[in-house]
Image (tube, rainbow, N blue to C red):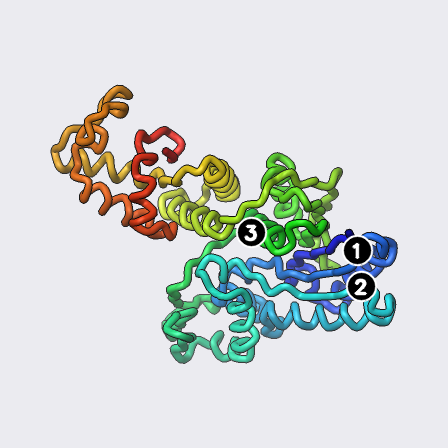
Amino acid sequence: MKAAWNLVVDFDGCTGTEDARNRLIDYIIAKTEVNLEKIDEVCIIIGSTRSMGLYYDFMASHLHNLRGNPHKSCAVLGGDFIAQLQQKMSEKLNDTVRVSFNDIMIADLLNNLELGTHYNLMKKYAKNYSEWSKGENSISVKEENKEYLTIAPKNPTSTNPSRINYKTNMRSLYDEHKLLMLYTIMQYLKIQHPQKPQLISFVDDRHDILSNLNNFFSGNPTLVPNNMTLVLKQHCIAGHQQPQFSMKNNIIGTGENQQNYQHLTQAIANEFNLYLQQAPWDSERTDSLSDIMVNVIKQSTKNRVYVSPRLKFSMKNKCSNDNQQEIKTKSDLESPNTDTRMCALSINHYLFYATSRLQSFNLHATEFNKHANRLLPFNNTGYA
């Protein structure tokens, strides 16, 4: 069976100029041509942090404009690149290899939206980005009772041209080093094509992003599905100085199907956002995200319910504040006495505080009740 070659591309740093686009297209065509017996499809996927949501796409365009560049949405950059690639591939290889585009974006998965929703929003509103950047009027993007983005007028006394006041009711995550993004894309492709061999090329200009991805997935090959090979490639716009990145070995996936990958992605994002609310501003966030990813995914394979460390902390404080008996020893935790095991809280109290924290993980009360006994005793990892 022939393989699909999926290229996850950071468009700003890799295709922002005509020269960069042409060099990347030439690379794809040359690689495809020498592997015609192995590849039957080339698929392009957006690998930019802009895929985190409409706000991120707009703000990236806004900041590029402040540097003297024209406004462009990621959807526009991607669309231009795909059109050029399709034309040149057709001319060079006579349509022997299919060229496709996958509009998966992590913003859709985080918000339980139909895939393609945010890509279509970006295409639809890209023409408005220039007007929005002026900050003279309030704008609101609401569709089907969902508030994707609301921008308030700038404070006229502000001296910061990049200052944009916004709000959104969309779940989001700023995954600067793209760990969760790449994991999610790979799991999605595995579900869509469980048997078909997949080559994943992650293309970015930044050495730090590629180096972090290499270290993380090389050390955790079970997070790469077993029908996939992951390759990390550096591609820069001419004149953009970046430390050179070279990958010694491709990463061969050894992971099994993770059918619940979307739930895991949401759980990881929510736990990381909780961490950011308490972490020092200069903390090493990439390491923290990688730790959270490994722990959440590892525990999911044991059919355990994930419990945030914040939940444990709030439960302990609740016991103290109510002047109720606290559990002191491991034997207390293992006691068959229900009142002791529950910190002497009523079951209703316990469910109220626990489910209020777990709602962000899309675990409903019925699911929580089903697994309630697994939540105790707690251990120091945040899991039952």
Instruction: Pinpoint residue 44: horizontal percent, then vertical percent.
Output: 68, 62
Point 52% across, 68% down: residue: 118
Apparent side of residue 9 relative to residue 308 in the rendered image (left or right): right
**Helix, strand or loop for disc 3:** helix
Amino acid type at circle 2 is Val
The local crowd at label 3, few if under 14, some if 14 to 19, many if 20 or more residues have their Cα within 10 Å, is many
**Helix, strand or loop for disc 1:** strand
Apparent side of residue 90 relative to residue 351 in the rendered image (left or right): right
Q: Earlier in the sequence, mark 3 or mark 1?
A: 1
316 w.r.t. 133: above or below: above
In this view of the protein, can residue 187 be seen by the observer?
yes
Q: Which numbered tag is attached to residue 97?
A: 2
Amino acid type at circle 1 is Ile
Residue hosting label 1: 39
Mark nearest the camera among 2 and 3 is 2
The Cα atoms of the two marked residues, 2 and 3, are separated by: 26 Å
Label 1 with label 2: CB-CB less than 8 Å: yes
The local crowd at label 1, few if under 14, some if 14 to 19, many if 20 or more residues have their Cα within 10 Å, is many
Point 57% across, 48% down: residue: 183
Mark nearest the camera among 3 and 1 is 1
Picture quarter containing residue 208?
top right
Residue 331 vs residue 33, the one in the foreground: 331
Residue hosting label 3: 184
